[in-house]
Amino acid sequence: MEPASSESSKRAKTLKNATRVPSCLVDGCTSDLTKCRDYHRRHKVCELHSKSRQVFIRGQEQRFCQQCSRFHSLGEFDEGKRSCRKRLDGHNRRRRKPQPEPLSLNSASIFSNQGTRYLHFGSSQIFSTSAMNTVWTGAAKS
């Protein structure tokens, strides 16, 4: 018989919560959220207070963060921003292109042979200057 009584108490709680009108969390706000967008009902904030620079919730100054969809203390925001610093930082990191690491001109690393293979040519002079002169003078005569 006990399971039946626990089921009836669960139903009573459900009915009790179903009749509750969703309202804004901001102190003194009496906005009825039943006709607002799902977003505002879900986060318990009216459209006006979701965009306000500061509101009072349980006596504390706060602002609604658009990224977190929560209220935070004003200290967590930069000036008039609507997203908290933590979320803005993550957003900016994802948007920035990775910067290539600058090449260090450390002479020890440039001239070291660790794992590097060099191709050596037999002669540093591939063309003789006299052969080049004859080619160019012959081309000029034609």
Image: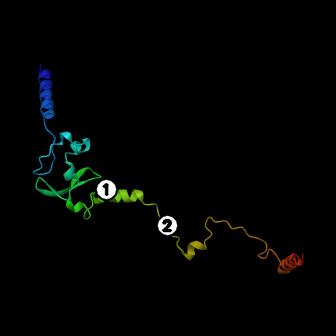
Instruction: Answer few, some or many: residues within 10 Å of disc 2's Cα (few below 14, many 20 plus, some between 14 and 19).
Output: few
- Position in image of residue 30 (x %, y %): 11, 46
On screen, residue 69 above or below 74 = above
Left or right: residue 90 versus residue 59 is right
Q: Amino acid at mark 2?
A: Glu
Label 2: which secondary element:
loop
Left or right: residue 115 versus residue 127 is left
Furthest residue in direction top, as rendered: 1
Q: CA distance from mark 2 to mark 1?
A: 26 Å
Q: Nearer the viewer, residue 128 or 124?
A: 128
On screen, residue 51 above or below 114 = above
- Position in image of residue 121 (x %, y %): 76, 70
Left or right: residue 13 versus residue 89 is left
Left or right: residue 135 versus residue 48 is right
Residue depicted at 31% across the width and 56% down the height: 87
Residue depicted at 13% across the width and 33% down the height: 19
Q: Nearer the viewer, residue 56 or 139?
A: 139
Q: Amino acid at mark 1?
A: Arg
The label number, if any, that marks residue 136 in the structure image: none
Please report whichever mark, 2 or 1, sits nearer to the chain's N-terminal start: 1
Q: Which residue is under mark 1? A: 87
Q: Which residue is under mark 2? A: 101
Image-quadrant location for residue 93: bottom left
CB atoms of marks 2 and 1 within 8 Å: no
Which numbered mark, 2 or 1, is in the foreground of this view?
1
- Position in image of residue 118 (x %, y %): 69, 68
Q: Nearer the viewer, residue 125 or 131?
A: 131
Instruction: Answer few, some or many: residues within 10 Å of disc 1's Cα (few below 14, many 20 plus, some between 14 and 19).
Output: some
Name the image quarter holding the N terminus.
top left
- Position in image of residue 72 (x %, y %): 21, 55
